[in-house]
């Protein structure tokens, strides 16, 4: 009997290995893949959403837009066609959360530097002071790669509308000042279909790690 088992051990080892592979394949097939939610205005904190769109529960997408980047180039929604991108709102003279946000956005830039499917988009909330020249100087200081990351300025009303009605990421400022904005720390993840897929605290490293993981997840779905 002992001799039989010695002669058959290769068979049993192969059987055990084959069984392990089959079990692993079944487990992988039966384990649901993580799917990021699709956010609509009704899903988000009302403080961050314009009252005219708070009721929308489906089919929300980033609409057409047109701004000017740090190189004086016109940047539109077409620039981001077919791209996964991360958007945020900032201003160059901000001394509180903006430096951390910019440094963390640079980490995202570095992670996907050679992947043309991923881009970044930062909007100034103070276009009256953040001119093209100011944005260019800021971009050079922060190591912005022009091929990957656009810092944009433009009409304040248009930026305000996009922030509150599309990206769902900016709070109201002083009620007495028309189109006054208080930007938040939010990074907004947008998929290739212009749908909002996630919000991340741009000041926290662990949130940036989560953002990078989620971007990779979206890329794998393409």
Image (tube, rainbow, N blue to C red):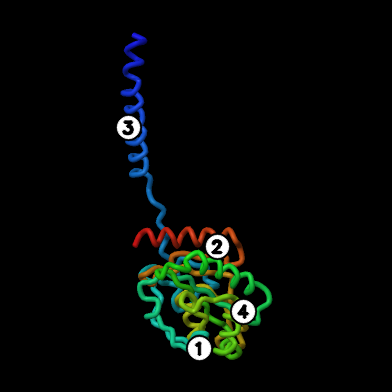
Above or below, 5 relative to 127: above
How far is mark 3 from mark 4, CA to CA?
56 Å
Disc tally is 4
Q: Residue at x 34, y 8 (%)?
A: 1
Viewed as shown, does residue 164 lie left or right of 22?
right
Dot 3 or dot 4, earlier in sequence: 3
Q: Which residue is mark 1?
A: 154
Above or below, 102 relative to 35: below
Please provide percent x and percent y for residue 57: 40, 68
How far is mark 1 from mark 2, CA to CA?
27 Å
Q: Residues within 10 Å of mark 4 (few under 14, many from 20)?
A: few
Mark 2 and mark 1 in contact (Cβ < 8 Å)?
no
Q: Is residue 50 visible in the rendered structure shown here?
A: no
Q: Which residue is mark 3?
A: 18
Dot 1 or dot 2, earlier in sequence: 1
**Most foreground residue, 218 or 201:** 218
Above or below, 25 relative to 18: below
Q: Residue at x 50, y 87 (%)?
A: 71
Q: Which residue is mark 4?
A: 141
How far is mark 1 from mark 3, CA to CA?
62 Å
How far is mark 2 from mark 3, CA to CA?
39 Å
Dot 2 falls on a residue whose secondary structure is helix
Q: Which residue is mark 2?
A: 208
């Amino acid at each position: 009997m002992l001799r039989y088992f010695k002669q058959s051990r290769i068979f049993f080892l192969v059987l055990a290995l084959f069984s392990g592979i089959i079990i692993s394949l079944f487990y992988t097939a039966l384990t649901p893949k993580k799917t990021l939610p699709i956010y609509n205005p009704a899903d988000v904190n009302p403080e961050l959403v314009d009252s005219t769109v708070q009721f929308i529960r489906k089919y929300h997408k980033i609409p057409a837009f047109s701004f000017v980047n740090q190189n004086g180039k016109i940047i539109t929604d077409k620039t981001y066609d077919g791209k996964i991108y991360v958007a945020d709102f900032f201003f160059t003279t901000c001394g509180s959360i903006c430096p951390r946000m910019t440094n963390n956005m640079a980490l995202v830039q570095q992670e996907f530097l050679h992947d043309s499917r991923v881009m970044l988009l930062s909007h100034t909330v103070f276009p009256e002071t953040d001119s093209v020249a100011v944005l260019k100087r800021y971009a050079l200081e922060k190591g912005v790669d022009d091929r990957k990351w656009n810092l944009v300025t433009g009409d304040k009303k248009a930026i305000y509308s996009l922030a509150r009605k599309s990206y769902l990421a900016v709070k109201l400022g002083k009620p007495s000042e028309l189109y006054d904005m208080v930007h938040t720390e939010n990074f907004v993840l947008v998929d290739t279909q212009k749908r909002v897929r996630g919000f991340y605290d741009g000041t926290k490293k662990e949130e940036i790690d989560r953002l990078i993981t989620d971007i990779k997840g979206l890329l794998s779905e393409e």
